[in-house]
Image (cartoon, rainbow, N blue to C red):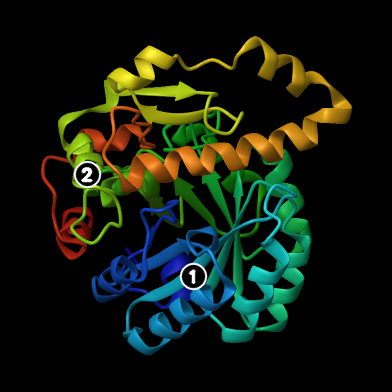
Amino acid sequence: MNTSITQILKIKYPIIQAPMFLVSNTVMVIEAMKGGIAGCIPALNYRTLDALRRSIKELKAAKVEGGSYGYNLIVNKSNIKYKEQLRVICEEGCDFIITSLGSPEETIKQAHKAGIKVFCDVVDLKFAKKVEALGADAAIAVNNEAGGHRGDLSPEDLIKLLKDNLSIPVISAGGVGCKVDIDEMLSYGADGVSVGSPFIASLEAGVTQEYKQACVDYGAEDIVMTERISGTPCTVINTPYVQKTGTKQTWLESVLNKNRKLKKWVKMIRFSIGMKATEKAAKKATYKTVWVAGPSIEHTTSILPTKAIVDKLTI
């Protein structure tokens, strides 16, 4: 499993524990590093800049040989904290930043000054070429089997398309729940993989026992797309509550999202509402349950320590 990603991040296995809103935390990442992989946390998991700064210091102190750590930044206007989060991360330092949902230009510029690598989420060749031109260190190919906000292309099609047209490494995101899946992604040409959903059902994950157990009890066929969280299609577990509320935008949301003048503001409001709804579901067991996950939970059969999940992916 020696690839360009293991060399760039100085990790044993070409695996990134994907950043997951509310799920990821420092304990998970520390255990991931001990297992020889990289771990990543969304900066938005921290309400304050001081909390974000403390988490970086904690990971820096706990870093072990063969592991690495990074942070995910939402880089569009919906994240009003973005620039300050970037500043703190660059001041404190980390191994890498993953950018999502916007232009990574400023992040790449500032991160590279601080000696931090930048990997950018992309769903097609058009945006992949853009981030490569901006100086991204790798493209994260978000395919149609990813959890949360996913792409439209299959893992094989997206990996091969990007590998044929880019000179930077390609990390595949989506559809990995076991070692066989990783071997398959690498056989398509991927330089590494980003794995999220299997780690939801870890002992260290910062969500409810009910959310973790849902990842055990439900499978790939129970994953559906909903527009009700952020206005952008997102994969969730098809719980009774999701079935009751439906997965399509209301007529009013649809009309507002089509209005050019209002679209940006509606998106920001929906993003904020969606984050709060997801936080409530993740932190408190309720019949109003919206649990984000991908089809790779098919391979999740029990709640395990993070290190044991890493072992399942690598041995």
**In the depicted structure, whether residue 219 falls above or below residue 192:** above
Amino acid under disc 1: Gly
- Mark pair 2, 1: CA separation: 24 Å
Q: In the orientation shown, which residue stands out farthest toward the right?
A: 261
Q: Is residue 287 left or right of residue 217?
A: right
Task: State the image quarter where residue 89 is shown.
Answer: bottom right
**In the depicted structure, whether residue 52 falls above or below residue 41:** below
Task: State the image quarter where residue 215 is shown.
Answer: top left
- Residue 307 seen in this snapshot: yes
Q: Is residue 31 left or right of residue 70?
A: left
**In the depicted structure, whether residue 295 falls above or below residue 113:** above
Q: Circle 2 sits in a helix, a strand or a loop, which is it? A: helix
Amino acid under disc 2: Lys
Residue holding disc 2: 212
> Which numbered disc flags the more N-terminal residue, 2 or 1?
1
- Residue 189 seen in this snapshot: no
Report the residue at 18% width, 58% height from top: 203
Q: In this view, does 143 lie to the left or right of 257?
A: left
Residue holding disc 1: 70
Which x, y percent locates residue 239?
Answer: 29, 23
Question: Quadrant where the C terminus lies?
Answer: bottom left
